[in-house]
Image (cartoon, rainbow, N blue to C red):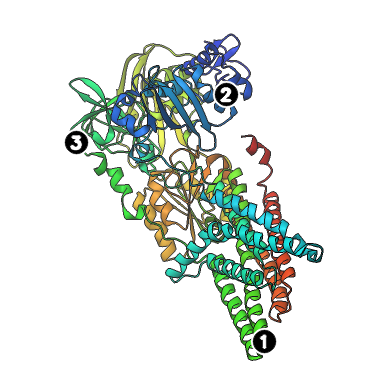
C-alpha cells in the first residue's frame, strides 16, 4: 500500500487534488492523464507562458473526449449552419467557449495557430466568452479546429440552439452612435454658451455672437432629430396603448425646450435652452447604456435547445453515422456515450443505463433502466455506451412538449412600477400648474408672460431628475450586482426584488450542490482492508452513489475481485479473498422487500453479516444555514422539489418549522404553486431554481432567479442569473435592491424641492433664461453624483464592495 503524502498536492494544470496519483513530469504533478497531455502539448509548442500568467489556469481533463466525437462536423449541411464565411481558401467561424475564465485562457487561444498550423488568426471576445477563428481550408478543417480546442481544454459549446439559428447575431450600436453625437454636441454647445453664462456678449462682436447662436442651433439638430428619437418612439407607443410612460414627459420637455429655444434665438428675445436639451438627451442615453452594459453578454432566454447536442450517432448497417438531430427519425437506432444527454424519447436496446434526470425532474438519484424501458429526452447517461431505438422525433419528444406549453413561454409584465406612477402623477401636476399659470396671465392680458410662463414651467419642472435618478441608481446597482455575480436582465427587476414578500426555493441543484454528496458510515469504523475491498468492488460500478463512496473511502490501491456481478437497480456482489461481498439496497442485501425506502443508503454485507450502511445525502451549499436564518426572519419561505422527501425533516429543522416544504412535485405543479401564492395569497414571489423543471415557475414568479455553477452554462428563462458561489449573499442582494428604491425616492424628493423653487419663480414669469439654463444641467450632474454616492455607500455598508478588487482581477 502506498503511503499518502502529508500535505495537499494539487494538479499543476487545473489545481485539483492529486494526492493519490503518480502522474508527473519532473516536479510537476497532475491529477489525470488528460491534464498531463495538455501540458505536454503546450510544452511541445513553447506555450508554457500559459502557466506563468495565472496559477493552475486549466480545467480538469479527467473526462476524456471520445474518438470521432466531432465526426458530425464533416457533414457539409452542419458546417453551413455553423460557419460565417467560406471561400476556396479560408473559413470564418465563431465558437462559444464557456471554459474561458482568465488571462491565461485569452493568451492561449490567441496563440492557437502555434498548435494547429492551419489556423490563420484568432480573436477573443472575453466578455462574451467567444473566439473568432479564421483557418485555411487546405491545411485543416472545422472538425480538426474543434478537436484542437477540445484537446487543450476548451471544447466549444455546439448545441441545437446554434444549429437552428438562421443568421449571425448583429450587435446594434445605434445607441452608442447617438451617445457620441449627443456628447459632442452637448460639450460644444456648452462651450459656445459661456459668453451667455457670464454676460460677456457686450465684449463680443455682433457678427461673432450671431454666428455662435446659429451654430448652436445647427449642433442641436442631430441631437433633436437623431439622438432623442428613442424617447419619442417609446412615448408614442405608450400613448397609443393609452399609457403615459416615463418617456412621455421627457419627450414633451425636449420638444418644448427645442421649440422655445428656436423661437427665442430667431426672434432675438433670448438665447434658448439648447444646452439643457442636449444635456438631457446625453445623460439619459449614458444612463441607459450603463444599464445595458451589465447584462449584454448574458442570455436570459435560453431554452432546452441550448444544451441539446447538434448531432448523434445513428447505427446503420452496423456502422455509426453522425447525423444531424433534426434528421433522426422514429425507429432509428442511436448511440449515447457516457456523460452525454439523451436528446430524444427512445427505448433502451443495449447497454447499462444509469440516467440522471435531475435537470428535468429534480430527482437527485440517477435511475437505472433496463432493456425495453423508455428513456425520455433530457436525461444524462452516467454509465457506459447505450444503444436506443427512437420512438419520437425531437419535435414531438416529452421535453419539447413540456417546454412548448404556453405557461413556459409567457410571463405577465410589470406595468405598475412606482417610477411610472410617480412620473404620471408628476406630469399631470406640472401640466396643471402650467395651465393655471397661463390662464392667469392670459386673463391679465400679459400674453408674453403667458407664453413665457407656460414654456418655462414645463422646462424647469421636467421630470428628468426622476428618470435620471432611477436610471443611474439602477445602472450602478446593476454594476455592483454583476461584480458580485448576480446578473439581472433589466433594471425593472431591481424594483421587483424590492417588492417581494415570499421566497420559493427549488432543492436539488439550488439549495444543494449537484456534484457533491455527503457520505457517512453508520457502524463502527471500517478497517483499511475493508475499505480497499469495498472500494475495489464499487469502482467497477458506474453508479454515482458508488463513485461517491469510493471517493469517501479515499484508498490508494485496489485489490483483485472474482465473480463480480452487477444487479441493475439493486447493487453489486463479488468474492475477495474467499469473502463474499454484497453491496447495495436494503432489499438486495437483506433479501426482504423494503417498504417506502426514501433515504439513499448503501448496505454492506460480508458473508452472512451486515457490517453497516453508508448514508448518503445531498451536500448543501456553503452558507446555506446562515442564509436561511437570515431570510426566514424577514420572509415566509417555501421549498418545493421534484425529489423525494427523505430530507424533509432536516429542512424543516433548518427553517424552524415556519416554512412550507413540498416534495415529489412535477414542473407544472411547481408552476401551479407559484400561481396559488400570487392569486390566492396575493404574494409577490421570488423563485430561485436551476433546472428545466423550474422553468415554468421561474417565468410565472414576479422575480425568477436561476442559480448556476457557470453563468454561461444552460439556465432556464429567468429574470436573473446567480453564480452558485454567491448563493450565501442572496439576503444582501435583496437588501441592496430595497435600498435602491429608497435612494431613488430620496433623490426624487430633492428634485421636487428643486422644482418647487424653480416653479415659484417660473409661474411669476421672473425666472431668467440664463438661470434656468444653468440650473438644469447643474441639477442633472448633482443627481448623478448623489445617486452614485448613495448606492456605493449602501453597497459598502451591506458588504458587497469588499471583494471589488478580486472581481476586477477575474
Q: Is residue 739 left or right of residue 661?
A: right
Tag 3–tag 1 contact (CB < 8 Å): no
447 left or right of 111?
right
Question: What residue did someone put label 1 on?
Answer: 446
What residue is shown with label 2? 15
Q: In what element is the residue under mark 2?
A: loop
In the picture of the structure, the residue carrying the numbered disc 3 is 330
At x 66%, y 72%, the residue is 264
Residue 633: percent from left, percent from top? 59, 56
Instruction: Examine the rendering and report whether any part of residue 501 can be seen.
Output: no
Q: Reading the chain from its start, which is encountered first: label 2 or label 3?
A: 2
Image position, residue 41 (x, y; %) = 50, 14
Q: Is residue 316 left or right of residue 145?
A: left
Q: Mark 1: few, some, or many residues within 10 Å (few <14, many ≥20)?
A: some
Q: CA distance from mark 3 to mark 1?
A: 85 Å
Mark-to-mark CA distance, 2 and 3:
45 Å
Dot 2 or dot 1: first in sequence order is: 2
Residue 620's place in the image compared with 656, above or below, is above
Q: Secondary structure at mark 3?
A: loop
- State the residue in front, 683 or 516: 683
Residue 610 is drawn in which quadrant?
A: top left
Helix or strand or loop: what does disc 1 sit on? loop
Considering only order in the chain, which callout, 1 or 3, is on the residue closer to the N terminus? 3
Q: Is residue 639 left or right of residue 485?
A: left
Amino acid at each position: 500500500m502506498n503511503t499518502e503524502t502529508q500535505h495537499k498536492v494539487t494538479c499543476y494544470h487545473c489545481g485539483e487534488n492529486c494526492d493519490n496519483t503518480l502522474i508527473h513530469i519532473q516536479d510537476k504533478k497532475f491529477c489525470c492523464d488528460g491534464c498531463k497531455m495538455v501540458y505536454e502539448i503546450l510544452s511541445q509548442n513553447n506555450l508554457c507562458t500559459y502557466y506563468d500568467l495565472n496559477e493552475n489556469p486549466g480545467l480538469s481533463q479527467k473526462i476524456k473526449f471520445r474518438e470521432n466525437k466531432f465526426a458530425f462536423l464533416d457533414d457539409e449541411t452542419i458546417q453551413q449552419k455553423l460557419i460565417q464565411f467560406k471561400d476556396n481558401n479560408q473559413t470564418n467561424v465563431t465558437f462559444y467557449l464557456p471554459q474561458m475564465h482568465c488571462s491565461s485562457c485569452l493568451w492561449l487561444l490567441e496563440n492557437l495557430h502555434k498548435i494547429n498550423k492551419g489556423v490563420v488568426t484568432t480573436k477573443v471576445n472575453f466578455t462574451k466568452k467567444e473566439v473568432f477563428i479564421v483557418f485555411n481550408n487546405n491545411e485543416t478543417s472545422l472538425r480538426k479546429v474543434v478537436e484542437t480546442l477540445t484537446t487543450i481544454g476548451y471544447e466549444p459549446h455546439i448545441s441545437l440552439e446554434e444549429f437552428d439559428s438562421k443568421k449571425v447575431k448583429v450587435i446594434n450600436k445605434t445607441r452608442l452612435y447617438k451617445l457620441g453625437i449627443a456628447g459632442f454636441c452637448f460639450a460644444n454647445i456648452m462651450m459656445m454658451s459661456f459668453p451667455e453664462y457670464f454676460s460677456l456678449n457686450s465684449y463680443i462682436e455682433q457678427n461673432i455672437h450671431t454666428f455662435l447662436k446659429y451654430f448652436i442651433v445647427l449642433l442641436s439638430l442631430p441631437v433633436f432629430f437623431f439622438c432623442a428619437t428613442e424617447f419619442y418612439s417609446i412615448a408614442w407607443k405608450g400613448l397609443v396603448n393609452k399609457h403615459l410612460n416615463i418617456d412621455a414627459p421627457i419627450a414633451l420637455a425636449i420638444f418644448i425646450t427645442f421649440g422655445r429655444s428656436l423661437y427665442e434665438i430667431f426672434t432675438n428675445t433670448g438665447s434658448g435652452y439648447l444646452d439643457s436639451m442636449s444635456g438631457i438627451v446625453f445623460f439619459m442615453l449614458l444612463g441607459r447604456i450603463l444599464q445595458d452594459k451589465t447584462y449584454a453578454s448574458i442570455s436570459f432566454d435560453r431554452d432546452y435547445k441550448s444544451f441539446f447536442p447538434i448531432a448523434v450517432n445513428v447505427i446503420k448497417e452496423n456502422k455509426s453515422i453522425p447525423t444531424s438531430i433534426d434528421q433522426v427519425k422514429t425507429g432509428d437506432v442511436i448511440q449515447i456515450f457516457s456523460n452525454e444527454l439523451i436528446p430524444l424519447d427512445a427505448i433502451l436496446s443495449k447497454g447499462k443505463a444509469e440516467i440522471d434526470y435531475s435537470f428535468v425532474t429534480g430527482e437527485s438519484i440517477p435511475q437505472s433502466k433496463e432493456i425495453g424501458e423508455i428513456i425520455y429526452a433530457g436525461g444524462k447517461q452516467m454509465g457506459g455506451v447505450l444503444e436506443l431505438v427512437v420512438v419520437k422525433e425531437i419535435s414531438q419528444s416529452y421535453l419539447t412538449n413540456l417546454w412548448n406549453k404556453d405557461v413556459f413561454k409567457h410571463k405577465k409584465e410589470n406595468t405598475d412600477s412606482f417610477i411610472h406612477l410617480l412620473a404620471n402623477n408628476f406630469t399631470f401636476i406640472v401640466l396643471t400648474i402650467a395651465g393655471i399659470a397661463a390662464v392667469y396671465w392670459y386673463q391679465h392680458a400679459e400674453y408674453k408672460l403667458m407664453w413665457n410662463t407656460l414654456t418655462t414651467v414645463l422646462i424647469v419642472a421636467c421630470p428628468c431628475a426622476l428618470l435620471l435618478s432611477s436610471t443611474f441608481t439602477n445602472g450602478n446597482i446593476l454594476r455592483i450586482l454583476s461584480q458580485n455575480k448576480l446578473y439581472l436582465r433589466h433594471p425593472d427587476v431591481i424594483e421587483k426584488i424590492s417588492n417581494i414578500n415570499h421566497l420559493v426555493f427549488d432543492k436539488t441543484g439550488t439549495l444543494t450542490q449537484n456534484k457533491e454528496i455527503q457520505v457517512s458510515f453508520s457502524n463502527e469504523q471500517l478497517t483499511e482492508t475493508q475499505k480497499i475491498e469495498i472500494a475495489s468492488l464499487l469502482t467497477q460500478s458506474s453508479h454515482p452513489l458508488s463513485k461517491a463512496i469510493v471517493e469517501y473511502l479515499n484508498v490508494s490501491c485496489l485489490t483483485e475481485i472474482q465473480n463480480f456481478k452487477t444487479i441493475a437497480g439493486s447493487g453489486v456482489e463479488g468474492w475477495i479473498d474467499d469473502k463474499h461481498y454484497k453491496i447495495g439496497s436494503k432489499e438486495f442485501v437483506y433479501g426482504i422487500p423494503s417498504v417506502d425506502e426514501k433515504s439513499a443508503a448503501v448496505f454492506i454485507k460480508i458473508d452472512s453479516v451486515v457490517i453497516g450502511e453508508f448514508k448518503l445525502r445531498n451536500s448543501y451549499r456553503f452558507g446555506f444555514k446562515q442564509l436561511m436564518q437570515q431570510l426566514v426572519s424577514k420572509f415566509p419561505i417555501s421549498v418545493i422539489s421534484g425529489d423525494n422527501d427523505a430530507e424533509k425533516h432536516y429542512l424543516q429543522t433548518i427553517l424552524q418549522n415556519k416554512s412550507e416544504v413540498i416534495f415529489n412535485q412535477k414542473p407544472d405543479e411547481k408552476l401551479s404553486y407559484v400561481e396559488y401564492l400570487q392569486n390566492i395569497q396575493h404574494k409577490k414571489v421570488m423563485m430561485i431554481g436551476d433546472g428545466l423543471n423550474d422553468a415554468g415557475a421561474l417565468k410565472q414568479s414576479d422575480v425568477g432567479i436561476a442559480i448556476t455553477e457557470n453563468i454561461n452554462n444552460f439556465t432556464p428563462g429567468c429574470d436573473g442569473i446567480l453564480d452558485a458561489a454567491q448563493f450565501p449573499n442572496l439576503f444582501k442582494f435583496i437588501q441592496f435592491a430595497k435600498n435602491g428604491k429608497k435612494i431613488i425616492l430620496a433623490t426624487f424628493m430633492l428634485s421636487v424641492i428643486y422644482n418647487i423653487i424653480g416653479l415659484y419663480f417660473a409661474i411669476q414669469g421672473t425666472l431668467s433664461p440664463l438661470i434656468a439654463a444653468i440650473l438644469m444641467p447643474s441639477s442633472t450632474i448633482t443627481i448623478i453624483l448623489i445617486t452614485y454616492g448613495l448606492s456605493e455607500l449602501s453597497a459598502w455598508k451591506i458588504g458587497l464592495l469588499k471583494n471589488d478588487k478580486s472581481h476586477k482581477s477575474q
